[in-house]
Image: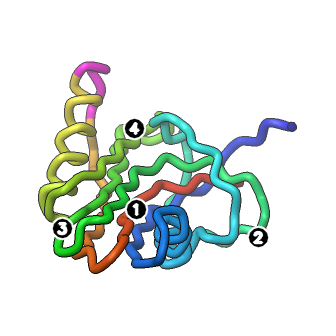
Amino acid sequence: MALEILRKFCLVAGAAEADTRLTAFDRALLHAGIGNVNLLKVSSILPPHAKEENHPHITPGLLVPTAYGAITSEHPGELIAAAVAVGIGDPGEYGVIMEFSGRVSREKAEDAVRGMVEEAFSYRERHLARVLVRGVEYRVERIGCALAACVLWS
């Protein structure tokens, strides 16, 4: 596989209900706009010079590097949430991506990832210029899934 420089990124989030844990995850991916690609889970570094896009324009079936947090629950009435954050520093430098999922509200999930980005920049001794955050929450009916992701592509 040829390695490419990842020049674009997008924060997405989705939540859905289904009959099984896997199909709930699949429907949450579709709701987030990334259900027809193959996710390649990556750790938490945003490439230098990557530009934010509003929507991932990716050919179906491709392998797509993605940092994501997801939670699936089979407990009716339970509140679940997922969030992702990207910390952006000085121009031309790499960024940091953090993801979270849990049995909390969207607001708490977003606060958690924001705090993780701030901590990551602090122990790297880097200037944090801004933080982008995207989250979602979902109240489970049968089997639900909440997912938030940072999608990277060329």
Mark 2 and mark 1: Cα distance apart in space: 19 Å
Q: Position of residue 154 (x, y in %)?
A: 71, 54
Residue at the disc numbered 4: 96
**Residue beneath label 1, please?**
147
* 2 or 1: mark nearer the eye: 1
Spatial CA distance of label 2 from label 4 is 27 Å
Image quarter where the N terminus lies is top right
Quick check: marks 1 and 3 in contact, CB under 8 Å? no
Dot 3 amino acid type? Leu
Name which residue lies at 40% across and 68% down. 13
Q: Give SS at disc 3.
A: strand
Sequence-wise first label, 4 or 1: 4
Of labels 2 and 1, earlier in sequence is: 2
Q: Which residue is mark 2?
A: 60
Q: Which residues are magenta?
A: 123-127
Foreground: 26 or 115?
A: 26
Residue 124 highlighted magenta (yes or no) = yes
The residue depicted at 37 percent of the width and 38 percent of the height is 90
Spatial CA span between label 4 and label 1:
19 Å
Cβ–Cβ below 8 Å for labels 2 and 4? Answer: no
